[in-house]
Structures are given as C-alpha cells and as structure tokens.
Amino acid sequence: MKYRIKQKFFSLSDSFNIEDAHGRTAFTAKGKIFSISSSQTMFDASGREILKIRRKYLSFRPACRIVNSDGSEWLIKKRWWPFWTTRFTIKTPKGELEMTGNLWQYEYEIRRRSELLATVSKALFSFSDSYGIDIYDESLTPQLIALVIVIDRMQHKDSGSMFADD
C-alpha cells in the first residue's frame, strides 16, 4: 500500500498528514506546542489514538520510542557507522528491524533481516517535508509510518524540530 506523509507547512508543532494512494487522509500525527516530553500522537482516520512517539532523553545516540496503544514499544536508535550511509536500528517486540538510507537522506529501506517491509522516498522540491512510502507488510502500517516521522525529526534536529537538544 502506498502512503504520502506530508508535514503541515503552517504549524507551530510538528504535525503531519498521512494520505493513502487515493488522496484520503488515513492518519494524522500531532505534536503539542508547549510540551516538555517532546511527544507526538498518531491518530487513525476516525480520530482514534494509535500510538505515541516519544524522545528518549538518556541515550548516547539519538533515540526515540514508539509506544503502541497496546503498551508495546519500539526503540529507534541512529547508528554512526558507516558514516557514508544513514542507518537506524529498530528494536521491536517481534525482533530487530533496520532502516538504511543513502548519504543524501532521500531514499530509505526498512527491513527485517532480508525481508523488505517498506521503501521510503523524500520529495526533493516541496515547501515542507514530504515522503512517499510503499508498505509491503500492512500489519505494521502505523508503526512504519511513525518510523518515517521519527527519522525525519532525527535528521532535522538542528532546524528547530521538537527533537532538538535543549
């Protein structure tokens, strides 16, 4: 299934609209304007809360947690080596995933061992951050979309995003 993740251009908080292949809003992710916890909440099309994205403060490398509505957690950490690629490890209750991207941070793949779960492409010419994501394991759709939002925040932490170090 294909989705488009687009950051809201005029927003005081980090908010995203996620559209399906037909242009309908499938999910939204909203951050709070004055939040100490630096969290975002993701909702489905009917407004039901699906998960929360939270920054992990006490970590040597940039890290975030995805807390699902059932209480399970995913931990995302940025890897520094090799330096010519962008790489993240994701620890889930069902095993480890890896997200790898190119040096310019425009193309990513999310894999569980050799199984391709999703591909991500960043739009080059847009006013706000915009990503296309092809998801091959639909049972993980909200979490894979949340991963893209986390990666976007980690990659742009110096540009005033909510995950910037204080």
Image (cartoon, rainbow, N blue to C red):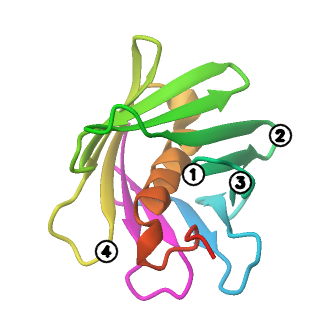
SS under mark 3:
loop
Where 105 sits versus 80, above or below?
Answer: below
Q: Where does label 3 land, which residue? A: 56
- Name the residue type under label 4: Ser
The secondary element bearing badge 2 is classed as loop
Amino acid type, residue under disc 2 in the picture:
Asp
**Residue marked by disc 4:** 128
Check contact, mark 1 vs mark 4: CB within 8 A: no
The front one of 15 and 79 is: 79
The amino acid type of the residue labelled 3 equals Lys
From the top left corner, tell me how far across and down residue 76 is, in percent: 59, 41
Amino acid type at image mark 1: Pro
Question: What residue does disc 2 label?
Answer: 70
Residue 155 vs 14, above or below: the answer is: above
Q: Nearer the viewer, residue 132 or 25?
A: 132
**Badge 4 element:** loop
What label sits on residue 62 in the rendered view?
1
Residue shown at the point (75%, 47%) measured from the top left? 67
Q: Position of residue 156 (x, y in %)?
A: 41, 65
Question: Mark 2: few, some, or many residues within 10 Å (few <14, many ≥20)?
Answer: few
> Quick check: 48 left or right of 153?
right
- How crowded pointer 1 is (Cα within 10 Å; few <14, some 14-19, many 20+) is rated as many
